Image: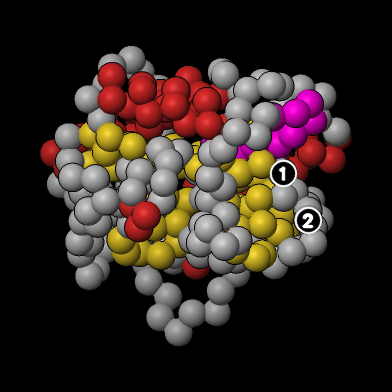
Amino acid sequence: QSGVVTGAPERPEIKSPDQIFRLADACQLARQVLDRIGAHVQEGITTEELDRLAHAFCVEKGAYPSPLNYKWYPKSICTSVNNVACHGIPDNRQLKDGDLVSVDVSVFLNGYHGDCAETYGVGNVDERGWNLIETAKYCLEAGIAVCRHGAKLSAIGDAIEGRAAESNCSVVPYFCGHGIGTYFHGPPDIFHFAADMDSDEKMCAGMTFTIEPVISEGGSDIVVLEDGWTAVSSDQSRSAQFEHTILVTPTGAEVLTGSSREF
């Protein structure tokens, strides 16, 4: 039902093979939606049009866009352009040559949520912009690389912040990854920065969560606009974001929102 927030477990859930299978289906559809939207990112299109495309494709596949009416969010995807760090609401603004746009897609399919995001460059993006996009992608990969059974959750943030610093970029600390399953957001919280935590929980095989660092070319401070969602950088610097939903395994991590397969 639209707008209903499903209760999450109090502790990180260790999923059964059947739960993993169902979650993987939702994640693969999320990836397919994102890939389809990404193919339409071009100069002149509006983010509202991208939102309509995503919504129609979700419905066509028997799914529902998870963000729509979630805590009163009004659209089916998030589109964050240039200095919008996260949770940008699609509107009638046309994308321009040189823009950076982050697209965050979440779908609800057969009782499970899948979640992924990617930043796209529109047309002739400047070198600094492409470097930012590349850095954000590498930061996500660095976070995934440290995931395995028995590893500390804090290792994810350590790896991401270290990789961002190598490129003279900063991690926007106000947004974290999250557990996911029949619930959209649940434990554990995944911090994307080096955090000194009193209780440093360890990963266990069967855990599923998102890693979704927002990387800024400037400072890390943000301001949330009056709509209650749109987070913009305080210094007007651009941001980029990549996200995957992952499954912790005994020896590493499986990316559930990797290359899509047809439904």
The segment highlighted magenta reads 95-103
Q: Is residue 137 left or right of residue 50?
A: right
Residue at the (24%, 56%) spot, across then down: 5
Depth check, front residue: 29 or 161: 29
Q: Residue furthest right?
A: 127
Is disc 1 surrounded by few (<14), some (14 to 19) or many (20+) residues within 10 Å? some
Question: Could you say which quadrant of the image residue 166 lies in?
Answer: bottom right
Q: Is residue 130 visible?
A: yes
1 or 2: tag closer to the N-terminus: 1
Q: CA distance from mark 1 to mark 2?
A: 8 Å
Q: Secondary structure at mark 1?
A: loop
Q: Is residue 114 visible?
A: no
Q: Which residue is mark 1?
A: 82
Which residue lies under the disc numbered 2? 236
Give the residue drawn at x 40%, y 65%.
189
Give the residue type at disc 2.
Gln
Q: Nearer the viewer, residue 155 or 48?
A: 48
In the image, is residue 101 part of the stretch drawn in magenta?
Answer: yes
How far across and down, in percent of the image, does residue 192 sit? 56, 61
Considering depth in this image, is 261 or 67 the residue closer to the camera?
A: 67
Residue type at numbered disc 1: Asn
> Residue 113's mark?
none
Q: Are circles 1 and 2 on residues that touch, CB within 8 Å?
A: no
What is the residue that sits farthest to the bottom in this orientation?
Answer: 198
